[in-house]
Image (cartoon, grey):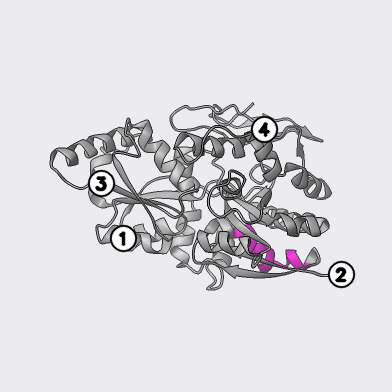
Amino acid sequence: MVLSLKIGFSPLNDSALVLLGEALGYYSAEGLDVTLSREANWSNIRDKMSYGLLDAAHVLAPMPLSRGLGLGPTLGKIIAPMALGANGNSVVVSPHLMTALIHDDKTKLLDTARALRDEISRRRAANAPKVVLAMPFAYSPHHFVLRHWVAAGGIDPDRQVQWVVLPPSRMADALRDGVIDGFCSGSPWPQMAQLNGDGQVLFSDPDFWTLKPEKVLGVREPWANENPDGVISLVRALLKAAQWAKAADTADLAKILAQPGYVGAPLEAIELALSSEGAGLLLDPQTTTFPWISHAKWFMGQFVRWGLTTPEHDFDTIARQIYRPDLWRQAAASLGLDIPTTDEKTEGGEPVPWTLDASPNPILMPANELFDGGIFRSA
């Protein structure tokens, strides 16, 4: 029996697994008849999932958690049975701001945050407008990365910076026209802005956090409850796509993503984003697709830190109701992947590759380090 479902995605490189599932036939091999829906912004995806117009989607990792915390439209719970990779974003600033923040090729990310503090002081003394930074959605990793970065430089993100929400496709134009001073967006749009001369990439996800969580597979909980085998089939298909992506030549992946119905950006921008100088997108099924409870708690900690919610929540229960490592384990075991023995890990503090306890074999994990030396222990 074939199971039909509709999956939404935003045209970004980190939607790769969702797109590869169709392009390489992994959905049909799992008995799934998938219709992909290319969406213009994250609000569209959120609202369509609320009203059952999408059964699943490529979503921002904090989006299902915001539902669990009662933030924004809360119609219908969304679960996250897997992550869709790690990294993939970049921060772009105007050429003028770049000159103020970068002094030589040895400038570290923490130094740029302190230089931004000095630039803000100069503007205030000159009675000039505030620094304006853009992100694609309020409840997003982009927003939290920008806030964490500026705060590390001694800047008050709420009083000293102006925030705006824009679709990634409009950010480069706003930067070129002087409406904003910088933005954080998923690739390849930052790389396209740089290639077009509209701005310069200041830093990318690996510079901020070498193994940063970013997008997850969001599934409407009612659909998941009605189709438990379908959820496992869907995760299996996406894990197969990740296996292909890990072994594939970057040029082959870029050509698939560049197709008009998929990411649809110029091939040069996609290739630059996927290169070693790009946004650091990782699609390894073994090390970047597990839905870590510690990631869920880190994101909810950011909600509290920046005043988006109060600390009076049972964060552990919310995390475990929404992020579902049990479903990942079931799908991954059937493909012979190694299974982590825990649902949580320390985030940060691992400057070099390290070994994760797993069965039947331990997993060699990439470095997991934040730029400011921060360590998050959710337990």
Q: Residues within 10 Å of mark 1 (few under 14, many from 20)?
A: some
Q: Secondary structure at mark 4?
A: loop
Q: Is residue 23 magenta?
A: yes
**Count of picture labels:** 4
Tell me, yes or no, whether the two marked residues, 2 and 4, touch with CB atoms within 8 Å: no
Q: Callout 1, which amino acid?
A: Ala
Residue 373 against residue 125 in the figure, above or below? above
Of marks 2 and 4, which one's residue comes earlier in the chain?
Answer: 2
Q: Residues within 10 Å of mark 2 (few under 14, many from 20)?
A: few
**Residue drawn at 52 percent across, 35 percent down:** 310
In three-dimensional space, the C-alpha distance between marks 2 and 1, rounded to whole angstroms, equals 49 Å
Q: Where is residue 117? Give x, y as percent.
A: 27, 35
Pair 3/4: label in front: 4
Q: Which mark is residue 174?
A: 1
Residue 291 against residue 272 in the figure, above or below? above
Q: Quadrant of the N terminus?
A: bottom right
Residue 286 against residue 342 in the figure, above or below? below
Q: Callout 2, which amino acid?
A: Met
Q: Which residue is disc 4 drawn over?
A: 344
Identify the residue at the far right of this view.
1
Q: Secondary structure at mark 2?
A: loop
Q: Quadrant of the C terminus?
A: top right
Instruction: Answer with the quarter of the image where residue 203 lies.
Output: top left
In three-dimensional space, the C-alpha distance between marks 2 and 4, rounded to whole angstroms, equals 36 Å
In three-dimensional space, the C-alpha distance between marks 3 and 2, rounded to whole angstroms, equals 57 Å
Tell me, yes or no, whether the two marked residues, 3 and 2, touch with CB atoms within 8 Å: no
**Residue drawn at 38 percent across, 31 percent down:** 152
Q: Which stretch is magenta?
A: 16-28
On the picture, is 226 further left or further right than 347? Answer: right
Q: Residues within 10 Å of mark 3 (few under 14, many from 20)?
A: some
Q: Which residue is disc 2 drawn over?
A: 1
